[in-house]
Image (cartoon, helix red, strand yellow):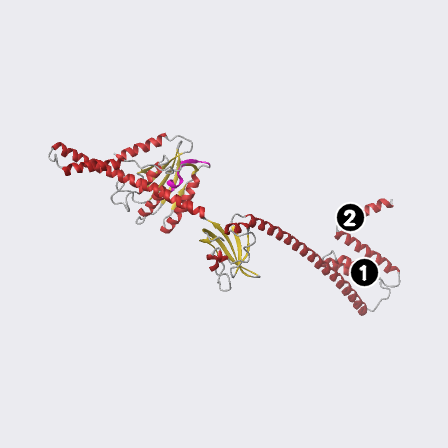
Amino acid sequence: MFRIWRARIREWTVLASPTTRAILGAGLLIGVIAFFDQRTAPSFGLLYLFPVIWAGTVLPRWQVGLMVVLCTWLTAMFNRFPFAPAESLAQDTLVFVALGGTGLVAYELTRRRHLEVEHRHTVEREAAARREAEEQLAFVINTSPAAILTTTDTGDIVAANAAAHRLFGVRDGDLPGRHVARYIPALGRVPTGSSATQNFQTEMRCRGERENGSAFPAAVFFSTYSTGQGPRLAAMVVDTSAEVVEREESNLEQLMASSRVLVSAMTHEVRNLCGAVAVVHENLVRSGKLHGDQDFEALGTLVAALTQIASVQLRQSSRQSRVEELDLREVLDDLRVVLDPYCEDAGIPVEWNVEVPAGLTVSIDRHHLLQALLNLTKNSLRALQAAAVRRIAIAVSERPEVVSIRVADSGPGPAAADHLFQPFQKGAACTGLGLYVSRALVRSFRGDLRYEPDPGCTFVIDLPKASRGWTNVHAMSHDTHSAAAR
């Protein structure tokens, strides 16, 4: 039986909480002290300090106070040497203060120890998290394809990743200690010392230089900040040579495509004039009035040669129209990025109703379509400068084989809609070739640009869906082109 009870007591001791064990242990100790204090002559009141200290390590202040009151009462009850009331009160007060002060000291010491332990654990967790974050940040910086470096307020490089060494053509580990102006002169002029009135967080386009002296265009994203060692500058450098080459090639392609359209328009008009001159020349030949006149015959030869030159079709380059299957939302997002700043500066709101199904692709030349859309929207901006109500609306609609983009504005609309797409329009703001060129660019990938006589001014660009026929729109484009030529 004793073994069973001992096992149960041990099991309870293990499972019970520290607070429960402390309360029961202190209560048991108080009972033992009170038992001996009642039966012996010497007073054991001093021993009440131990249960009070034990309870002070786990109980809150008010419970420690209750235990101190209980121990003070037991000391007064089992005191075998009664005093006068005044002396007894002083003795009880002294016992209460001693026990209470001891319990509160034990409580405060235990609380501070717990706080120190929690603080140490918090510091250890923060240190571990900081080490992990530093390791991850160092891994990201070292594996980043962009060159990342930090400098002091004097421009000396403090740290640089592997990409920075590759970009500047320097052996690994040789960049720290060198001056940043040797590789990015513009960074050497950024104020980072005590003379700087504010921190910078910006980007700039500048020229970079490699160790061998070769230059390259660079995009630099940098920020300045303060540390315990002084001001610092952190910079991310990207070589934009490929971007510049691609942009220049794209601009050249657009220029060549527009030039071909312009030259075609001019040769078309020259061919019409030559045809009229040739008719007059044939009439004069039939009349015989100028028969044998050498100047008249030379004029006929010149007219025939000029007609032949104007009839020569311009050779199409291999990259005249780069047709791709693209998500229409990407193209509209690019248009919005380019168009919104223009409209904001002009104070003209744009309504975008371009909700399209996910995955809707069209077969287009991205640059040609963007140029045509920009031409239309810029025409709308010019037409709305003097309008009372200024608004541009861009909407997208879908048909079985066609996706249409509508560009509408609240302007007065064209005065003569029958000759909109003919070159060299009278009364045009510039050369009168904007709509002619825009329609030619759209037709280069089998689309079409047309005008709808709605209230205001509305132009519609019809685009072929990817991997589908374009018979109807292509036939419509051919008929419209033939009618315009006639």
Front one among 332 and 314: 314
The amino acid marked with disc number 2 is Val
Q: Which residue is mark 2?
A: 14
Q: Which residue is mark 1?
A: 48
The single residue placed furthest to the left in the displayed view is 289
Percent x, y of residue 227: 56, 60
In what quadrant of the picture does the C terminus appear?
A: top left
The secondary element bearing badge 1 is classed as helix
Note whether residue 108 is visible: yes
The secondary element bearing badge 2 is classed as helix
Above or below residue 27? Residue 83 is below
Mark 1 Cα shell of 10 Å, populated few (<14), some (14-19), many (≥20) = many
**Which region shows up in magenta?**
359-370
Q: CA distance from mark 2 to mark 1?
A: 26 Å
Question: Which of the 4 quarters of the picture holds residue 336?
Answer: top left
* Residue at horizontal 83 percent and vertical 56 percent from the top: 31
Front one among 5 and 456: 456
Asked if labels 1 and 2 touch by Cβ distance under 8 angstroms, the answer is no
* Residue at horizontal 36 percent and vertical 48 percent from the top: 348
The amino acid marked with disc number 1 is Tyr
In what quadrant of the picture does the N terminus appear?
A: top right
Q: Is residue 27 left or right of residue 431?
A: right
The single residue placed furthest to the front in the displayed view is 212
Percent x, y of residue 168: 50, 52
Note whether residue 421 is visible: no
Upstream in the sequence, badge 2 or badge 1? Answer: 2
Percent x, y of residue 293: 13, 37
* Residue at horizontal 84 percent and vertical 62 percent from the top: 44
